[in-house]
Image (cartoon, grey):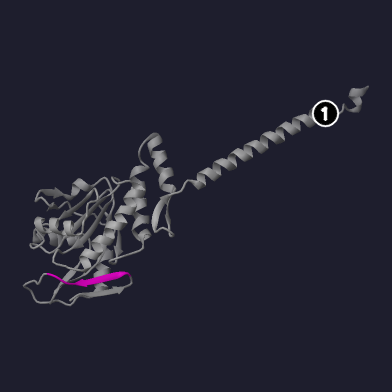
Amino acid sequence: MLGLLGIAGVAFASEGNVQPAAPVKFDQKPALQFSQSVVGQRVGDYTLLDRSGQPVRLASYRGKPLLVSFIYTGCSEVCPVTTRFLAKAVKYMQDALGADSFQVLTVGFNAPWDTPLAMRDFASRQNIKLPHWEFLSADAVTMQNFTRDLGFSYAYSVTGFDHISQLTLIDQEGKVYRQVYGDNFELPQMGEPLKKLVGNVQTQYPGWEGLSNRIRLFCTVYDPKTGAYTTDYSFFVSMFISVVMIYALAAWLIREWRRVLRRKPPNASEAV
């Protein structure tokens, strides 16, 4: 059985592994307040495991924006749907900003059942093959601390878990920058803050590279007709045409003014 409740852009899921613990009522209001309370705070440098069972330090992801989503592999509907939707959004933003401009983590919070093998199987079932996207797991203590840092809360239910569908944006310094809620959302909810974070990194490059990145990001805009971000240089093209026209008009006025001066008859004193 699947329960899905959307309130103010928040989705709650209940499905999957049954835990050996008493069910706990999940209260959405304090969960959202807790989620928002961590914005601006630095995330600890935890060590998790990738799909091959190799240790991965969170600090290794600093220097670029990072997107983090939480799932549990026993979920058969909400978590897969949320992940597949996120894959579409990530693909759109990789096309717009560059595949290596940001990184993505999907983390299994149901320790110890969400093992590296389970995460690898989950990624395979969702057909996630995008670059710079890893699926991680950890021991129970590490996961408890990590989810706390990111403001993610969940509760056991009779069928699995109740939890917020939450996407956390972390800046290049490792601080929580924005929370995006729901198993689906309008692309600009993720795209606009992500574009700003990418800009904070790429516009700091020296010389022409930084300037060209600034222009490209300025011209990367959301097109509601296609539902994707596109690069539109029409502003700079129009500005260039306007400058050329103003220069041509100024040159014509100066030329005409000089011609009038040359044709002006001498005054009376000059005639004498």
Residue 15 in the magenta stretch? The answer is yes
Q: Which corner quadrant of the image does residue 185 belong to?
A: bottom left
The 10 Å Cα crowd at callout 1, few under 14, some 14 to 19, many 20 or more, is: few
Quadrant position of the N terminus in the picture: bottom left
Quadrant (top left/top right/bottom left/bottom right) for the C terminus? top right
For image coordinates 9% across by 51% down, the residue present is 53
Q: In this view, does 101 lie to the left or right of 133?
A: right
Residue 164, percent across and down? 24, 68
Which residue appears at 41% of the width and 58% of the height?
A: 226
- Residue nearer the viewer, 93 or 181: 93
Extent of the magenta region: 9-16
As drawn, the residue found furthest toward the right would be: 272
Q: Where is residue 72 in the image (x, y as percent from the top left)?
A: 15, 64
In this picture, is 260 found above or below 99? above
What amino acid is labelled 1 in the image? Arg
- Say whether residue 206 is magenta: no
Q: Nearer the viewer, residue 89 or 205?
A: 89
Q: Position of residue 158 (x, y in %)?
A: 12, 77
**Which secondary structure type mostly characterizes the magenta part of the structure?**
strand
The answer to which of 9 and 159 lies nearer the viewer is 159
Residue labelled with disc 1: 263
Q: In this view, does 157 lie above or below 194?
A: below
Say left or right for 6 vs 148.
right
Residue shown at the point (8%, 63%) measured from the top left: 113
Q: Which element carries disc 1, helix, strand or loop?
A: helix
